[in-house]
Image (spheres, grey):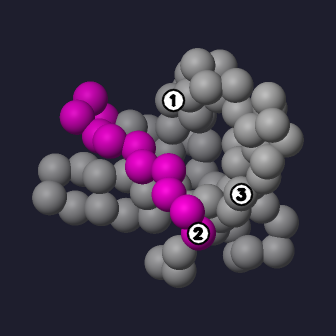
Amino acid sequence: MGEALDAYQHAFRTRIAPAVGYDGRYFLYLELDSGNEHLIDIHVRRGDDEFCARQDRDLPLQDDDVVVLMAFMAC
């Protein structure tokens, strides 16, 4: 997943970093051009399933996986 996040950050001029104090679940999403910062949750859709990726940048992705960045929500 780390490679996918790195590619996203490069393509959209953002920085995505683990958020401190949320039990390893959420990320801070910084828009580099505006400086706006958001708390986001990252999930992976795999087939008919969806799961919280937590802060695991080493999570192996499968070819058909979809990485979903969304506004903060409890999972």
In the image, is 64 to the left or to the right of 43? left
In terms of sequence position, does the residue under pointer 2 or pointer 3 come before the other?
3
Determine which quarter of the picture holds residue 43.
bottom left
Q: Secondary structure at mark 2?
A: loop
Magenta stretch holds residue 68: yes
Above or below for 15 versus 36: above
Labelled pair 2, 3 in contact (Cβ < 8 Å): yes
- Residue type at numbered disc 2: Phe
Identify the magenta region. Answer: 62-72
Q: Residues within 10 Å of mark 2 (few under 14, many from 20)?
A: some
Res 72 label: 2
Magenta stretch holds residue 28: no
Task: Tell us which disc is closer to us: 1 or 2.
Answer: 2
Task: Tell us which disc is closer to us: 3 or 1.
Answer: 3
Which residue is label 1 attached to?
4
Q: Residue at x 29, y 40 (%)?
A: 65
Which residue is label 3 attached to?
38
Q: Residue at x 16, y 50 (%)?
A: 47
In the image, is 26 to the left or to the right of 54? right
Q: Secondary structure at mark 3?
A: strand
Res 75 label: none
Determine which quarter of the picture holds residue 50.
bottom left
Q: Where is residue 14 shown, x and y percent of the image? A: 71, 33
Above or below for 5 versus 42: above
Q: Residue at x 50, y 45 (%)?
A: 59
Q: Can see residue 18?
A: no
- Residue type at numbered disc 3: His
Q: Where is residue 35 shown, x and y percent of the image? A: 85, 41
Closest to the observer: 9 or 1? 9
Q: Residue at x 55, y 63 (%)?
A: 71
